[in-house]
Amino acid sequence: MNPALAFDVMDPACPSRTVLRHLTDRWTPLIVTVLSGGSRRFGQVRDEVGGITAKVLTQTLRSMERDGLVSRTITASVPARVDYELTELGRSLIEPIQALRGWAEAHAGQVLDARASWDGA
């Protein structure tokens, strides 16, 4: 990357917005969390994430691979074995995603209380 090139997520035309949108979608943070524990097969990722369809998982993993966050390794066997793992770039997401997860888990009760109060008003 050209160091003179600056990105500003607050600029509507900046491509960093698409990166941010991808990183904060419904599934990417959960997949990063699963893969932070090391390489996993497709079915393991699906089971550990929970609630994701095979189609959506495939789409998300492909998108993450395209963005350089995940690598896919195919091992010749019957059936073929496919493993996914975070790349170095993907591993750089572990800490910020863990921080968001920690905040969400620590404050979920307060958020639910606020929702109930709002909905009851």
Image: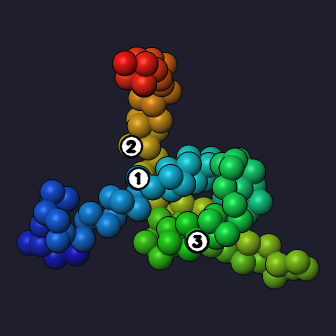
In the displayed structure, would residue 35 be above or below residue 14? above
In the picture, the quarter occupied by the C terminus is: top left
What secondary structure is marked by label 3? helix
Split into 4 quadrants, where in the image is the N terminus? bottom left
Residue 39, given in percent of the width and then of the height, sits at: 66, 58
Q: Earlier in the sequence, mark 1 or mark 3?
A: 1
Mark 2: which secondary structure?
helix
x and y percentages locating residue 7 in the rendered image: 16, 65
Q: Which mark is residue 24?
A: 1
Residue corresponding to mark 3: 59
Q: Position of residue 27 (x, y in %)?
A: 54, 54
Q: CA distance from mark 2 to mark 1?
A: 11 Å
Tag on residue 87? none
Amino acid found under the numbered disc labelled 1:
Thr
Q: Residue furthest front?
A: 121
Q: Position of residue 32 (x, y in %)?
A: 53, 52
Q: Quadrant of residue 13?
A: bottom left
User: How far is disc 1 from disc 3 in space, using C-alphas?
Assistant: 15 Å
> What's the amino acid at mark 3?
Gln
Q: Is residue 6 above or below residue 37?
A: below
Which residue in the structure is indicated by mark 2?
Answer: 96
Residue occupying the point 47% across, 76% down: 66
Local crowd at mark 1 within 10 Å, few (<14), some, or many (≥20)?
Answer: few
Badge 1 marks a residue whose secondary structure is loop
Please report the residue visible at 15 percent of the width from the left and 57 percent of the height from the top.
10
Q: Are marks 1 and 3 in contact (CB under 8 Å)?
A: no
Q: Amino acid at mark 2?
A: Pro
Is the residue marked by circle 3 packed among few (<14), some (14-19), or many (20+) residues within 10 Å?
A: few
Q: Residue at x 45, y 31 (%)?
A: 104
In depth, the one of 78 and 112 nearer the eye is: 112
Residue beneath the point at 71% across and 65% down: 54
